[in-house]
Image (cartoon, helix red, strand yellow):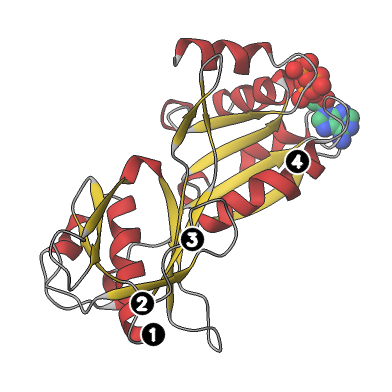
């Protein structure tokens, strides 16, 4: 874990639906490769409480810029139960650090963990140059897919999550049939960590064809491709989801 940090306090929980924490409580955070341990400190023995946050449920974290107080804000999506399958609901919790530098250090440590860069946990000093570059996604949106709501869902659901995950992105709206196919044939793929299709099966089909038509298709087809279903049928996305459990 990190060298013992000064305790953080948890003044409030902006947004989301997490239970508000006591404004005066102090917390100690410990990072491990799989979890964040949050321990509420108390001068009275037996009154300490622990929260174990699996990294698999953590979307990201941020430090709001000045003049906001030096907060470490965590965004996570614990699974909840519903009649069929699992649903996740956004939770937000903010911890007040002693200084902005302290909050930024925590934020950097958690972001390294989320990208499986464990070296951060070994050294005592944090250096910004050690931070891995943010992940980059190419988002392809067909504004006419399904009932024509793909862009609206993007703005209300998808982009806020991508920003909270500190992922940088380029969003392209397809303008015609075969636009995505031609684009994918030409782009420099090493610039992207993945391609996300926000549309129906048709656009995914175009992207796969575009990848296979490249001279470097053997490498190109290994590019991670995801689909956020916004089409009318979404049969392929439904099948993937079904088989992924
Ligand atoms: N701006 C656009 N105008 C017209 N057609 C487009 C545009 N952008 C993409 N397309 C084409 O629309 C076709 C259908 O889109 P897509 O499959 O994504 O949606 P859908 O038909 O609503 O969904 P599903 O295939 O799941 O039923 C694609 O093959 C794509 O070539």
In the rendered image, which residue does mark 4 sit on?
Answer: 153
Q: Position of residue 67 (x, y in %)?
A: 56, 89
Q: Are marks 1 and 2 in contact (CB under 8 Å)?
A: yes
Q: Which residue is mark 2?
A: 103
Q: From the viewer's perspective, is residue 146 above or below residue 29?
A: above
What secondary structure is found at the residue carrying circle 3?
loop
Q: Nearer the viewer, mark 1 or mark 4?
A: 1
Q: Earlier in the sequence, mark 1 or mark 4?
A: 1
State the image coordinates of residue 96 (x, y, percent, origin top left): 40, 77
Residue at screen point 76% across, 13% down: 233
* Marked residue nearer the N-terminal end (2 or 3): 3
Q: Residues within 10 Å of mark 1 (few under 14, many from 20)?
A: some
> Relative to 36, does residue 10 appear above or below in the rendering?
below
* Viewer-nearest of discs 4 and 2: 2
Can you tell which mark lies on residue 100? 1
Few, some or many residues within 10 Å of mark 4 (<14, 14–19, 20+): some
Return the mark for residue 20.
3
């Amino acid at each position: 874990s990190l060298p013992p940090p000064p305790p953080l306090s948890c003044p409030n929980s902006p947004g989301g639906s997490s239970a508000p924490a006591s404004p005066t409580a102090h917390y100690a955070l410990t990072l491990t490769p799989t979890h964040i341990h949050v321990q509420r400190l108390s001068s009275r023995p037996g009154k300490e409480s622990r929260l174990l946050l699996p990294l698999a449920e953590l979307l990201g974290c941020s430090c709001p810029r000045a003049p906001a107080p030096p907060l470490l804000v965590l965004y996570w999506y614990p699974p909840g139960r519903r009649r069929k399958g699992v649903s996740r609901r956004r939770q937000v919790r903010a911890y007040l650090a002693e200084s902005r530098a302290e909050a930024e250090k925590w934020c950097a440590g958690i972001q390294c963990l989320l990208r499986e860069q464990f070296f951060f946990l070994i050294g005592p000093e944090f250096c910004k140059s050690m931070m891995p570059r943010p992940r980059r996604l190419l988002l392809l949106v067909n504004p006419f897919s399904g009932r024509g709501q793909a862009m609206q869902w993007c703005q209300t659901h998808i982009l806020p999550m991508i920003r909270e995950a500190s992922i940088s992105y380029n969003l392209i709206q397809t303008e015609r049939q075969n636009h995505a196919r031609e684009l994918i044939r030409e782009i420099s793929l090493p610039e992207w960590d993945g391609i996300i299709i926000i549309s129906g099966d048709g656009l995914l089909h175009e992207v796969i064809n575009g990848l296979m038509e490249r001279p470097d298709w053997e490498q190109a087809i290994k590019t991670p491709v995801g689909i956020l279903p916004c089409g009318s049928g979404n049969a392929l996305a439904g099948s993937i989801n079904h088989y992924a459990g």
